[in-house]
């Protein structure tokens, strides 16, 4: 059944055929015979046949399309292979730990009267947090002051008695034994004064401990006790938790096999040390976003965990914006070495399968050619290619869906990630 375009073409040709009728065919002389009339119509039949042939040829040419029946080359995005020095990044799991942690605990027994802080707020060292009933300790303090006064009075009396007996014993007015008893009483009074002074200090400390203060500056969590709760110094009742998070530690582990392989590659010259960058780490959150500020590697543990075969590392990361919370799991990107003369490809350009990794390279006459490559590891959203590509070659990254005819030439254009990301958005907007 002819298509609408073919029917339209046939109708156009039929209309043109109507114009080929001679003006005086119907007025041919009636006196001539049938043979003469047939000869009269021969030119008209020749013209009709020529018109039909022309229409058929035009339809075939239109159906065949341009360039001898081949569609135009598909436009694909390509990148040019370039050798570059790539810092090898190892991505490892890590856990955030507060720089300093202080558990606020009760140091005296008593009932909590007040909570003096806002939960979740920043507190300063020495700031009052809780008030424990201090009445018993205040009474003990005042009693210690009274005992101190009594001890000082006894000391004055005993010292005066010993001083009076000294010339008497020299004059042999009193016995030596009586004088020694007076001197001992004076020294005992001095000891009583010292004991009373210590009791005052203890009582004062208990009064001070009843006002619970922050041992360090940082962010305080929720209150673990409420007003009216009885806390105990013997049990060291925990009242709250303060953590310093302006900077945090990130503890992570690395396989001892990876550490040894890295050292061997460095020793053999396959890799070279990243220098100062080796001490920098980047933190990646669960949503894939990387923190703007980098941290610094503090140390690598000298021992290996016997149960897991891992080596522990620690980094310190600035956290002024509070994106990292103690106990949070993150990914740590650590630059330990550099790979000279390496090739990076976007991951979307590589086809991975059980038989190997392949890419499409623009070959002779702009025809795509499949190429086997060797991948070392992932570098963010790119693959680090060890072998299979040469400098200057063009690798197809985008436009695979446009290559309908296998082996047909393509039109390579420079690819950029921004343009590739904008294309779906533009297509969605135009569809709306």
Image: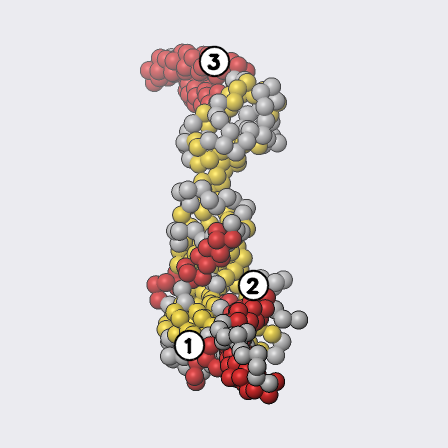
Q: Position of residue 198 (x, y in %)?
A: 46, 24
Q: Residue at 44% across / 57% down in the picture?
A: 422
Task: Measure how far apart labels 2 and 1 are at the Cα level.
Answer: 41 Å
Decide: few, some or many residues near mark 1? Use Cα within 10 Å; few <14, some 14-19, many ≥20: many
Q: Residue at 35% across / 66% down in the picture?
A: 275
Q: Residue at 45% across / 71% down in the picture?
A: 76
Which residue in the protein does label 3 denote?
A: 142
Q: Position of residue 211 (x, y in %)?
A: 48, 23
Q: Are marks 2 and 1 in contact (CB under 8 Å)?
A: no
Which residue in the protein does label 2 denote?
A: 310
Q: Residue at 46% across / 28% down in the picture?
A: 213
Disc 2, SS: strand
Which residue in the protein does label 1 denote?
A: 394
Disc 1, SS: strand
Q: Position of residue 47 (x, y in %)?
A: 51, 81
Give left or right: position of 117 versus 233.
Answer: left
């Amino acid at each position: 059944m002819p298509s609408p375009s073919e029917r339209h073409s046939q109708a156009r040709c039929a209309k043109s055929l109507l114009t080929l009728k001679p003006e005086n065919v119907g007025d041919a002389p009636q006196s001539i015979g049938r043979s003469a009339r047939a000869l009269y119509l021969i030119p008209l039949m020749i013209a009709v046949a020529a018109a039909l042939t022309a229409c058929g040829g035009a339809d075939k040419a239109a159906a065949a399309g341009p360039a001898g029946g081949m569609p135009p080359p598909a436009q694909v995005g390509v990148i040019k292979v370039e050798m570059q020095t790539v810092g090898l990044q190892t991505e490892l799991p890590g856990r955030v730990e507060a720089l300093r942690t202080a558990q606020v605990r009760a140091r005296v027994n008593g009932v909590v009267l007040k909570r003096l802080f806002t939960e979740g707020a920043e507190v300063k060292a020495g700031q009052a947090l809780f008030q424990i009933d201090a009445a018993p300790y205040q009474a003990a303090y005042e009693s210690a002051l009274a005992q101190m006064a009594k001890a000082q009075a006894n000391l004055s009396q005993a010292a005066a008695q010993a001083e009076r007996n000294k010339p008497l014993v020299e004059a042999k007015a009193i016995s030596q034994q009586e004088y020694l008893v007076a001197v001992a009483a004076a020294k005992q009074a001095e000891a009583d004064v010292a004991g009373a002074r210590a009791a005052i200090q203890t009582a004062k400390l208990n009064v001070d401990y009843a006002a619970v203060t922050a041992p360090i500056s940082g962010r305080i969590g929720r209150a673990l006790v409420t007003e009216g709760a009885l806390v105990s110094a013997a049990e060291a009742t925990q009242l709250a938790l303060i953590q310093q998070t302006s900077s945090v530690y990130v503890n992570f582990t690395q396989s001892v096999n990876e550490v040894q392989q890295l050292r061997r590659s460095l020793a053999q010259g396959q890799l070279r040390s990243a220098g100062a960058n080796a001490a920098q780490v980047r933190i990646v959150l669960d949503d894939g976003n990387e923190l703007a500020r980098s941290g610094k590697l503090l140390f690598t543990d000298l021992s290996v965990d016997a149960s897991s075969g891992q080596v522990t590392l620690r980094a310190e990361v600035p956290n002024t914006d509070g994106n990292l919370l103690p106990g949070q799991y993150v990914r740590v990107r650590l630059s330990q070495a550099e790979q000279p003369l390496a090739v990076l490809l976007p991951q979307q350009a590589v086809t991975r399968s059980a038989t190997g990794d392949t890419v499409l390279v623009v070959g002779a006459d702009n025809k795509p050619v499949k190429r086997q490559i060797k991948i070392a590891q992932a570098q963010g959203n790119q693959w680090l290619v060890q072998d299979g590509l040469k400098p200057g070659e063009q690798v197809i990254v985008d436009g695979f869906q446009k290559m309908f005819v296998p082996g047909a030439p393509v039109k390579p254009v420079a690819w950029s990630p921004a343009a590739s990301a904008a294309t779906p958005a533009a297509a969605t907007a135009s569809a709306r």
